[in-house]
Amino acid sequence: MVQTASAKSLSIRNLDKSYPLGGGRRLPVVTDFNLELAPGEFVTLLGPSGCGKTTVLRTLAGLEDFETGEILLDTRSIARLPTHNRRIGLVFQNYALFPHMTVFDNVAYSLKLRRESREKIQQEVQAALASVGLAEHGARLPGQLSGGQQQRVAVARALVMHPDLLLFDEPLSNLDAKLRVQVRSELRRLQKQLGTTALFVTHDQEEAMSLSDRIAVMQSGKIEQIGPPEEIYARPATLFVAQFVGKVNAFSSTIVGEEDGKAVVELMGKTIRTPLPSADMPKNVLALARPEATILQDPQHSLLAGIVEEREYLGALIEYRIRVGDTLVTAVRVALGDTMQAREGDHVGIGFLEETIHLLPETKRGA
Ligand SMILES: Nc1ncnc2c1ncn2[C@@H]1O[C@H](COP(=O)(O)OP(=O)(O)OP(=O)(O)O)[C@@H](O)[C@H]1O
């Protein structure tokens, strides 16, 4: 096993990075970007293609220069150091292994460049391969391994240098769905065991949820919200965040009062009671209801009524899209053991688990 070094914090402060566009113009990608990781923390940058995730990672690694800002590991500034002096381990999407070198030599590569002794190399490489469960595979060529195993070699190659920070750029996206889930839980276990601070980039919300202590949801070079997965999912700060981490029903609504410690909210002409929002919440709000908190009911005794326009069978779940006037409401039920099921064309009632409804200022609807 790779020996655990004491974990380091990461601070990115006021980072500005743009790319040259030609003709003297530049494309700003991140502007005044700030992010702090606690020692041993696993944080994911989650966001749509082009929002700047990879650029942040490459800048940390020293693969891109930047205009202004500071990057610290604990109190050590690494912003102007060459890549090989930053003590950062990098794992990319495409593994980037040398195909003609054995697994052992791939992992040993950086140690050899540093002219470490034969004994030290032997010991460190074996420990790194053991960490990822590949102690017996050192003599193979990468082409003789599965995709998941190749990615584990790439992880071993990053670990062998005892990095202060691990950076992952979509490392699971070349793996098939089942393997992705397996390798991601291995990765999580290994990172917790080693205690190395890690920053992970993905556009896959489920991956981010399952791996991270905290998720930073990015849009257009900015962090829209950062927090633990449960907070991002249940209490998103904007509609963009809510929609990026899952499906959501968003109703333009009005807070009409307060009763018994609940907000009284008018939604599609009906009244619901939701958890009280903060005191500065305006009256015009978006009421957000996740599909799993949207309940099918008998239309005679329900808040809203509509017609099932689409029923999508997903195996474990069934997703319904129900037309209520101009609005399509999405509800999800477990496929087995749920007595309230419906077919396309059925008239159904809709209710909500009101305690899970999250209110946002209408202005957080975004573009
Ligand atoms: N070398 C470059 N030169 C010019 N523009 C670039 C360069 N690399 C990236 N960009 C632009 O910078 C923006 C951010 O790109 P970046 O790769 O960081 O996004 P991303 O969020 O990682 O996207 P993806 O998930 O598709 O990798 C995009 O508009 C992209 O076109």
Image (spheres, rainbow, N blue to C red):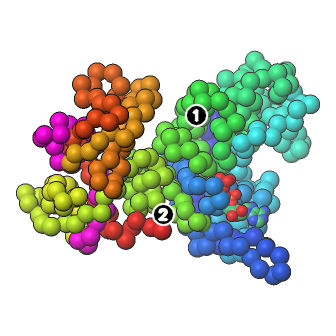
Find disc 2 in the rendering and name its residue. 224
Residue found farthest to the bottom = 24
Q: Observer-nearest residue: 39 or 272?
A: 272
Q: Does the Cβ of the disc 1 residue fall within 8 Å of ligand 1?
A: no
Q: Is residue 106 visible?
A: yes
Q: Which residue is pictured at 70% across the width and 50% down the height?
A: 88
- In this rendering, the count of numbered labels is 2
Q: Where is residue 120 in the image (x, y as percent from the top left)?
A: 81, 33
Element assignment for label 1: helix
Find disc 1 in the rendering and name its residue. 184
In the image, which disc is placed on residue 301? none
Q: Which residues, given as a range, are shown in magenta?
A: 282-303
Question: Which tag, 2 or 1, sits closer to the chain's start?
Answer: 1
Q: Position of residue 187 (x, y in %)?
A: 59, 34
Q: Where is residue 153 in the image (x, y as percent from the top left)?
A: 74, 31
Q: Which residue is pictured at 59% across the width and 26% down the height?
A: 178
Element assignment for label 2: strand
Q: Is residue 227 visible?
A: no
Q: CB atoms at circles 2 and 1 under 8 Å apart? A: no
Residue 300 magenta? yes
Image side of residue 310 versus residue 19, left or right: left
The three-letter amino acid code for the residue at tag 2 is Glu
The three-letter amino acid code for the residue at tag 1 is Arg
- Relative to 192, is 103 above or below? above
Q: Where is residue 307 in the image (x, y as percent from the top left)?
A: 29, 42
Q: Observer-nearest residue: 86 or 168?
A: 168
Disc nearest the viewer among 2 and 1: 2
